[in-house]
Image (tube, rainbow, N blue to C red):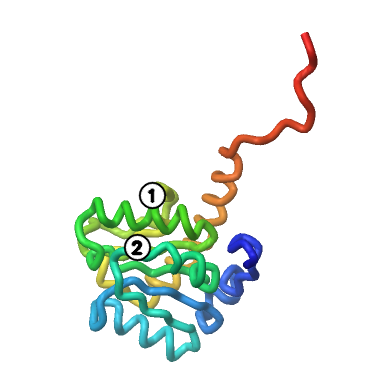
Amino acid sequence: MVPATEQPNPIMTSEAAAAPRSAHIVVFCDRPGPLDPLLDWLAEKGARITHFPLRRLPLDWFDTYAGCHDVALVDADFLGDQGAMIDFGMRLRRFAPAMPVIMASRRVTTSDYSTERMAICDVTLRMPVTRGDLLEAMSAALENHHFWMEKRGDNRPRIADAPPPAA
């Protein structure tokens, strides 16, 4: 299996972000749910939508499917309380680090397109979400995710090229 960070990602181009037709989106939510109109619109535009109705993902899902998706869209209210949302986001980050994550919730005061919550997601949207909100979120999520991946790489310990000089 090719590591997720090495797989081609068609949504990573600005053209793909503006036109979601080439995106493969995994959605974690109830159906029917508040994101349905957006999901229908994305599907009409040609995006491939994979609906995943479970709150707790089995680890084999990550191994088999996470690398096949360009972005995750999560109905955070579907997950439960704030702790469940954080746990879910951290699990996605750990097991699918190459996948940008957009969380949507009615419980947040306002949408956040910054990197403030990068430990759990790339963008947080306040529901209800409009088409314009979603397109902006997808673009910001790609940019923020790139920043998170760079930051993550900078914080990893590096193996020295040569042993330290003898004293």
Secondary structure at badge 1 equals loop
Quadrant hosting residue 50: bottom left
Q: Residues within 10 Å of mark 1 (few under 14, many from 20)?
A: some
Label 1 or label 2, whichever comes before in sequence order: 2
Is mark 1 in CB contact (under 8 Å) with mark 2? yes
Residue position for label 2: 103
> Looking at the picture, does residue 129 appear above or below residue 124?
below
Residue position for label 1: 117
Q: Amino acid at mark 1?
A: Arg
Q: Residues within 10 Å of mark 2 (few under 14, many from 20)?
A: many
2 sits to left or right of 69? right
Quadrant hosting residue 22: bottom right
Quadrant position of the C terminus in the picture: top right
Q: In the image, what residue occupies the spot 29% across and 57% down?
A: 85
**Residue 150 at what x, y percent from top left?**
59, 48
> Looking at the picture, does residue 85 appear above or below residue 49?
above
Q: In the image, what residue occupies the spot 47% across and 69% down?
A: 71
Between 41 and 155, the one lying in front of the other is: 155
**Residue 155 at what x, y percent from top left?**
56, 38
Q: Residues under labels 1 and 2: Cα distance? A: 10 Å
